[in-house]
Amino acid sequence: MSEEQQRVFQIQRIYVKDVSFEAPGAPEVFLEQGQPKVNVQLGNQARRLNESGEFEVEVTVTVTAEINEKKAYIAEVKQAGIFTIKGMDAEIEQLLGAYCPNMLFPYIREEIASLISKGSFAPFHLQPINFDALYQQAQAKRAEEQGKQETAH
């Protein structure tokens, strides 16, 4: 079997690309009573690094908490990985959009929990995220938008 026909999937490196933590309401926010209202934003993207089949996949999670309408904290982590993918042209979009983010998620989950804890706030653990379902939803939306554009012409 030639090298071009071989199917290769390898993790080259997993790393934290960017970390940010802010507690804009501190120290007064620590005196507030009540349950925090937490908002979680999620994003992911992928890009080809070279023609050798290396890709960077990046997952971003931003957690914002408010207590009594006062900003308690903002924690943001960009977790990334470099993956080598060859001979899987049919599956490459799903690998980059779902499989690789699933591999990065435990790292970003741990980093978010650590940041919030170090900020002296109550423990916060991200719920599991089904990147496969998110990928399927994004594909369906893309197909729907393409269908609308084709009927508009």
Image (cartoon, rainbow, N blue to C red):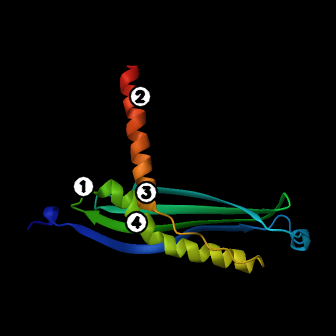
Which mark lies nearer to you, 3 or 4?
3
* Location of residue 152 in the rendering, given as x and y in whole percent from the top left corner: 41, 21
Whichever of labels 3 and 4 marks the residue nearer the N terminus, that label is 4
Q: Residue at x 47, y 70 (%)?
A: 104
Which mark lies nearer to you, 4 or 2?
2
Q: CA–CA distance between discs 3 and 4?
A: 14 Å
Tell me the element at label 3.
helix
Asked if disc 3 and disc 1 are in contact, CB closer than 8 Å, the reply is: no
Residue to which mark 4 is pinned: 100
Tell me the element at label 2.
helix
What type is the residue that disc 2 sits on?
A: Lys
The tag on residue 148 is 2
Which mark lies nearer to you, 2 or 1?
2
What type is the residue that disc 3 sits on?
A: Ala
What type is the residue that disc 4 sits on?
A: Cys
Residue to which mark 1 is pinned: 89
Asked if disc 3 and disc 2 are in contact, CB closer than 8 Å, the reply is: no
Asked if disc 1 and disc 4 are in contact, CB closer than 8 Å, the reply is: no
Q: CA–CA distance between discs 1 and 4?
A: 15 Å
Residue to which mark 3 is pinned: 133
Q: CA–CA distance between discs 2 and 1?
A: 27 Å
Residue 46 makes an appearance in the image: no
Whichever of labels 2 and 1 marks the residue nearer the N terminus, that label is 1
* Location of residue 103 in the rendering, given as x and y in whole percent from the top left corner: 43, 71
Whichever of labels 1 and 4 marks the residue nearer the N terminus, that label is 1
Tell me the element at label 4.
helix
Whichever of labels 3 and 1 marks the residue nearer the N terminus, that label is 1
Q: CA–CA distance between discs 3 and 1?
A: 21 Å
